[in-house]
Image (cartoon, grey):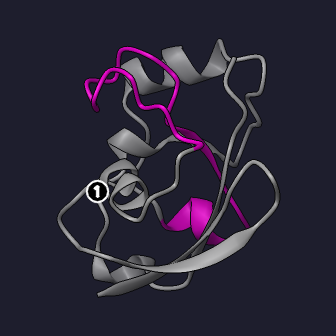
């Protein structure tokens, strides 16, 4: 398992054991974070699984594809160099220690 720290909208932080091979969104939802709507189910057609990736973790993630970039840059809560759609980030072992914060919904 991969240890990831997740901060919810209230500011509460909790470590989860994430399963490699699943998306970050799936792992967050599987660990009972109700703040993440993820209404499209991971199809990259909404922005309701938006997270901020803290510190050097952002640079460790795979590059954003154009469809994700287009959606997330239109969010009123977009932050360059930390915003990602969690449905587009597949968890891998090298993400151990990642810190993410669930972003408010646009």
In the current view of this chain or complex, which residue is farthest to the left?
Answer: 21
Mark 1 = which residue?
Answer: 90
In the foreground, 58 or 46: 46
- For the point 22% across and 59% down, the residue is 22
Residue 80 part of the magenta segment: no
Residue 53: quarter of image: bottom right
**Residue 47 image point, x, y percent:** 52, 22
In the foreground, 62 or 76: 76
In the current view of this chain or complex, which residue is farthest to the right?
Answer: 11
| Figure check: 102 above or below 55 | above
Q: Quadrant of the N terminus?
A: bottom left
Residue 41 part of the magenta segment: yes
- Left or right position of 85 against 99: left
- Left or right position of 71 against 39: right
- Left or right position of 11 against 86: right
| Figure check: 101 above or below 99 | above
Most common secondary structure along the magenta stretch: loop
- For the point 27% across and 29% down, the residue is 41
- For the point 64% across and 20% down, the residue is 73
**Residue 48 image point, x, y percent:** 52, 27
Q: Quadrant of the C terminus?
A: top right
| Figure check: 40 above or below 25 | above
**Residue 16 image point, x, y percent:** 46, 78
Classify mark 1: helix, strand or loop.
Answer: loop
- For the point 52% across and 40% down, the residue is 36
In the foreground, 68 or 12: 12
Estimate how packed mark 1 is, as few (under 14), some (14 to 19) or many (20 or more) residues with alpha carbons within 10 Å.
some
- Per the rendered image, the range of residues in magenta is 35-60
């Amino acid at each position: 398992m991969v240890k990831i720290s997740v901060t919810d909208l209230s500011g509460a932080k909790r470590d989860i054991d994430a399963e490699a091979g699943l998306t970050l969104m799936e792992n967050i939802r599987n660990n009972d974070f109700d703040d993440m709507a993820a209404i499209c189910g991971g199809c990259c057609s909404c922005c309701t699984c938006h997270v901020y990736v803290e510190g050097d973790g952002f640079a460790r993630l795979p590059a954003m594809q154009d469809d994700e970039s287009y959606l997330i840059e239109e969010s009123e809560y977009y932050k360059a160099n930390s915003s990602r759609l969690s449905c587009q980030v597949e968890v891998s072992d090298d993400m151990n220690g990642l810190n993410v914060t669930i972003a408010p919904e646009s």
